[in-house]
Amino acid sequence: MSTNWWDHHPCNAGYRSADDKFVGEPHLMPFAEVDRWAGKQVLDAGCGIGAVAKRFARHGALVDAVDSSPESLKLAKKRCSKMSCWQVDLTALPPSFGNRFDLVWCWGVLHHCLEPQAVLHALHRTLRSGGTLKLMVYHRWSLRVLEMFLEHPVAGARAVVLGDEALHKFISNHSEGATGCPYTDLYEPEQLQRMVEAEGFAVQRCAVDHIFPFEIHAWRHSEQRLRLLRRALPRDLYQLLERRFGWHILLEATK
Ligand SMILES: C[S@@+](CC[C@H](N)C(=O)[O-])C[C@H]1O[C@@H](n2cnc3c(N)ncnc32)[C@H](O)[C@@H]1O
């Protein structure tokens, strides 16, 4: 049996429709700018089941999709025959990827990597000069983290008392749709920016975004019922909260 947790929990595989990802993460498509990459070489680094890679391919990009989970890749291949899929760790990308891509897309992956700096180094190598990196990682000071403690108060309090290692385990355990993710780090925008710049990228923008808009339990049963917070707050105020306490840090940089 595979020891890769992602093989048993391919990302978003439980959604009723592949497009649910874009309903639950409405900021993703505007950030991806899929039309901009038609005819260009795109690397989806940590593609999961290929939901976004498929969108790039459908809009005319030439897509290479990489993931370390064979089961996720199987689903990605089924979903889109137009892209090339590679089962490989992001720290060990093939030499043929060097200086090749116009866009490296890495959504929700770096915070699961044990060696994030080595991954950024590898991603930098794959980009052409002038190429673009688009990255999303989880934000430390987010309402999502507060929510984890509210949903699991006993385990959360225990983790706080036990210290850093237990806290890291608690966050990892509850960071995904399925429980038990083995490794999740949380980031702050300045820290992420420094890590990216250390590899020679020029950061164009780095901003916090995204509060999941739907009631989680209803969503798990394929219902799109808006959360109280989303229903009650005026849009501007909600967006202000997203920019300060959102769950995602979006970073765009060039080589
Ligand atoms: C949260 S999922 C995101 C998947 C996809 N980017 C999406 O947005 O749907 C994280 C993915 O990263 C992959 N992953 C984690 N660490 C990796 C590594 N070091 N090398 C390659 N893939 C990795 C996992 O297998 C998993 O499919």
Image (cartoon, helix red, strand yellow):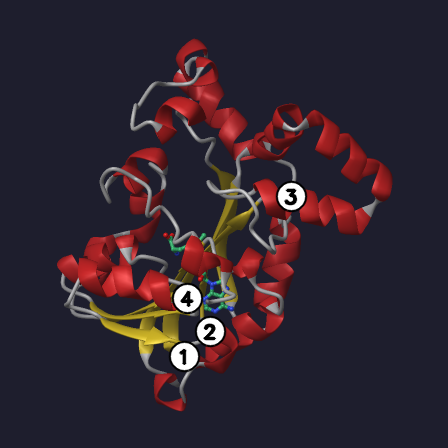
Query: Is the distance from the Cβ of mark 4 to the nearest ligand 1 atom less than 8 Å?
Result: yes
Task: Please say if 99 is above or below 189.
Answer: below
The residue indicated by pointer 2 is: 123
Describe residue 200's horizontal placement relative to residue 154 as left or right: left
**10 Å crowding of disc 2: few (<14), some (14-19), many (20+):** many
Task: Please say if 237 is above or below 216.
Answer: above
Seen from the viewer's position, the closer of residues 217 and 197 is 217
> Horizontal and vertical percent for residue 87?
37, 75
- What's under tag 3, amino acid-wise? Ile
> Horizontal and vertical percent for residue 79?
19, 58
Seen from the viewer's position, the closer of residues 100 and 119 is 119
The residue indicated by pointer 3 is: 171
Mark 2 and mark 1 residues within 8 Å of each other at the beta carbon: yes
- Numbered mark located on residue 126 in the image: 1
Q: Residue furthest toward the top?
A: 232
Mark 4 and mark 2 residues within 8 Å of each other at the beta carbon: no
